[in-house]
Structure formats: structure tokens, C-alpha cells
Amino acid sequence: MSENVIVNAEDENKYLPENPWISSIPTLLAVFIYVIDGTIANVALPHMAGSFSATRDESMWILTSYLIASGIIIPSVSFFSKLLGRKNFYIISILLFTIASMLCGLARNLGEMVLFRILQGAGGGGILPISQALMMESFPKEKRGTAMSLFGMGVIIAPIIGPVLGGWITDNWSWPWIFFINIPFGCLAAILSAKLLFNPPYSRRQKDVKIDGLGFFFLTIWLLCLQVFFDKGNNADWFNATWICWVFGISCFAGICFFISQLKRKNTLVDLSVFKDRNFVIGTIIQVVMQAVLYASLAILPQFLQSMMGYTAFLSGYSMMPRGLGSMTAMIICAFIADKVDKRALVCIGLALLGFAGLFFGFLNLQISSINIMIPNYVMGLGMGLSMVPIINLSMETLTNEQMTNATGLQNLLKNIGSAIGTSLVATMLTRFSQVHQYMMVGNLSELNEAFIERVQATAAMLSQYTSPSVAHYMAQYSLYGQLLKQSSLWAFMDSFRIFGLLCFVLIPLLLLFKRNKVES
């Protein structure tokens, strides 16, 4: 039997803005430019690497530095909000993000770009958790489903639009404009935040706030080493590389020290007491896995379309648009019914749709038409939208408004880690599964296989018109081996899609563990 949590609605609604929709305008604008910047640079990475005369591995630090910096700031938002006042810290974060965006567009070498991306990540790290907390706090509980539907549009649709917009800007203008475009919107978001944001008493600057230097140090080392581990682990063959073992060990040690310091000491960077709330823990676990699936699919599908289907970078990004349309459809549905039906039912339907879409992708082949990509993409976007918005509400439902800023910071930190895990996991899965399938099939390329001999002879006969018979025979064997590699890669993609689909079905039973929240009028 599920437990009931009694919440006094009068206390929860004590500090609410007169018009929460007006105060949400700068919040939604800031969220959109921050989230879209996480993926818009991906397609421009080769162009930036060329401008800076950097290798592909070196240019990856342009993405990694941004994620590390934002990951360090995200769980610290509660501390900085107490130190500076939440509204002040929010405006400072937007301005720092905007100024760093301008500097990124003006960068002359890789070192400058990485430095400015660190500043951009540091500025952007406070935007998402504070925006989520503001949207949750500004609306009464009975209207939070509608509010979070709008918030979800930025969080889910922006990463999908990012690659398409980045490709178009890079092709038609130049890569610095993917950063310059943030400047007017960032300035507008900062001005509107100063004018329109609601600032309740509990979110204002507090006196005698001490800096948790030890906690911040352990947090920085933990996330820095963890991000390097995830980014470079697959290329270094994971634990077969000694330096990867050291990086992972240091990350684990620093992470353990960070959590111990937050539990044992006073005036800490984060308040871990929110993990006593079962709804928060279960909701965060589900969101972390969903985030891993979202970012893994964003990495794997364009790669499949470009390497296996021959799509251009722009077309592969364009093929992701139906997912955005599916998410928009889900947001409209949630806006009307999220506060009227059991949120667990919506999450269940969303996870089921995500699972079916993953399994559908797992049965594609190289003879498919574009409609076979569009339909499951739309279903995946629909599932992501239907599940993401209600699960955010469920995870925060039993928390007080005073806990929101700290809780959203911790939750978004773990979701960031989930994104890194998903992206690294899918890269490893593609490599390993391709090797397994290649090993299983290569035995068929044998002189004892009559079908193989016939295919070699037929291909050699065709090629012998242009070269000598011995060279034609060699080219025929090489051609068939290339087809084997392509087939093994195709099966690796299919296996990965199926696993991510099954993961979504595994999450559904966790919904039974949520407490029901009863609100007194």
C-alpha cells in the first residue's frame, strides 16, 4: 500500500507571484539558449578543429570543457544562491554565459576556445536547475503539470533542434555565429529576469554563508576525472589502459570524499537530506536513465544515417526533426491533462512509447526509406515528452519550496552524469558489438564456402573488364570483406537500439514505488 504525504496547501502557496506566466518568460528563454548550446556545437566541431589546426581528439575538449564546468556549478547552485541571492546569481549566470558566448566566437586558437567554453559552462550551469526550481515554485501544485510542460519544451526540444540549427548556421554563415547568436537572446533574458522574476524571501541573500572550499575541491576533482574517463575511455580501451584506471580511481576517491564531507560537516555545498525523500530518489533514477537514452540516441542515429545510409550532416540533423514534433505534441497533451490524470500513468505510456521506438529502430535495414526513420523518431519524441514532464513533477511533489533549488541542482548533476554515461556507453557498444558480429561472420569468407566462391568469381569477372584477373580477384575479396564490415556495423547499431528500448521497459515497474501526495485545501 502506498504511503500518503500530507501537505498544507496554504503554506505551499504562501509565496506565489501574482502572474506566474509573466515571470516564466525570462526563465524559458534562458533555458532554451543554454540547452541548445549543449548540442549546437557538435556539427560545427570539424570546422572549429580545422580553424584551430587541431585533431579530432583535441577538438573534443571544446565539448568536454563545457560539460565539466557546468557539471561543477550545477550542484553548487543552492550554495551560490544563499551567498549572492538566487535572483542575483541567476542574472549573473545569464550574463556570464552571454559574455563567454561572445568570447567563444572571437577565439583565435584551441586554448582560448577551451578557456572561454569553461566560462560559458560555468555561467550556464546555474541556469537550468534554478529555472526548474523557479517554474516549480511559481505555480500552485494543481498547475505545475502545465508549467512543467512549457519547461519541458526547452529541455527536450532544444537538444534536437541544436544539430539542425548548428548545421544550417555553419553552412550558410560560419561557425562563430553559433555563439554570436546567443548574445541578443542572453541580454534580453538578463534584462527580463531583472524586471519580471519573482523573488520570495527564502531565496534572498543570507548572512554568514561560509564557503565550502573542501567540498568544492572534491566536487571539481570528481567531475573532472569522471568526464575525462567517459570521454576518453572507449578510445583508450577502458581499463586496459593504466592511465584510465588511475583517472577512474581518483574520480571514485574524490566522489566518496565529496559525499562524506557533505554528510559530516556543517555549511556544506549541497544538502543531501533530499535523498531521504523516496519520490525524489525514484524520480531521479528514472530521469538519469532517460537522459542516457536521449543523449545516446542523439549520438547514434545521426552516426547511423551518415555512415550507413550516406546522409549528409544537415540531412541527418534534419531527420531528427520529427522527434521534436513528437515532443511538441506531447507537451500540448501534458499541458491539458497533466494536472487531471495520474502522472504515473502518463510516465508509463511515455516509457512504453520510448521502448517501442527503440525496438522499431532495432529492426531497420539499409534498404529503408526516410519514412521508416521519421515514424519511430516521432514516437520517440512523443514518449520522451509524455514521460519527462510528469516524472519531474512526481520527483519534486513531496518536497517543500525551500528544498527546490538544492534538489534541482543535485538532480540535474546526476542527469548530466547520465548523459555522459549514455554517450560513452553507446560508443563502446558500437565498437564491441561490431567486433563480435565480425568475428561470427568472418568464418563464412572461406574457400570452403561455395556461396562465397561464387560471389567472388562473379564480382571478379565484372571487375576483370577494367584490370588484370589477379587484381580483380583480390578486389572482389576486398569488396566482400567490406560488405561484411558494413553488415557487422549495421547489426551493432541494431543491437544498441534494442538495448535502449528494453531499458525503458525496465523502468516502468519503478513507478509503483512512488508515494501518493495528498494536498489539503
Image (cartoon, rainbow, N blue to C red):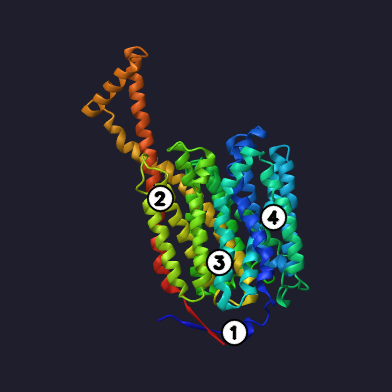
Instruction: Identify the residue under disc 1.
Output: 9
Say left or right for 143 vs 468. Answer: right
Instruction: Identify the residue under disc 2.
Output: 497
- As drawn, the label of residue 190 is none
**Which of label 3 and label 1 is nearer to you?**
3
> Between marks 2 and 3, how big is the CA–CA gap?
27 Å
Instruction: Identify the residue under disc 3.
Output: 149
**N-term-proximal mark, 3 vs 1:** 1
Task: Give the residue drawn at x 51%, y 37%.
Answer: 312
Say left or right for 199 vs 61. Answer: right
- Does any portion of residue 300 appear in the rendered image? yes
> Between marks 3 and 4, how big is the CA–CA gap?
26 Å
Amino acid type assigned to the residue bearing label 2 in the image: Phe
Amino acid type assigned to the residue bearing label 4 in the image: Ala
> Residue 205 location, x and y as percent?
76, 71
Circles 3 and 4: CB atoms closer than 8 Å: no
**Which of label 4 and label 1 is nearer to you?**
1
Position of the C terminus by quadrant: bottom right
Amino acid type assigned to the residue bearing label 3 in the image: Ser
- As drawn, the label of residue 122 is 4
> Residue 20 location, x and y as percent?
66, 73
> Residue 337 location, x and y as percent?
49, 72
Corner quadrant of residue 500: bottom left
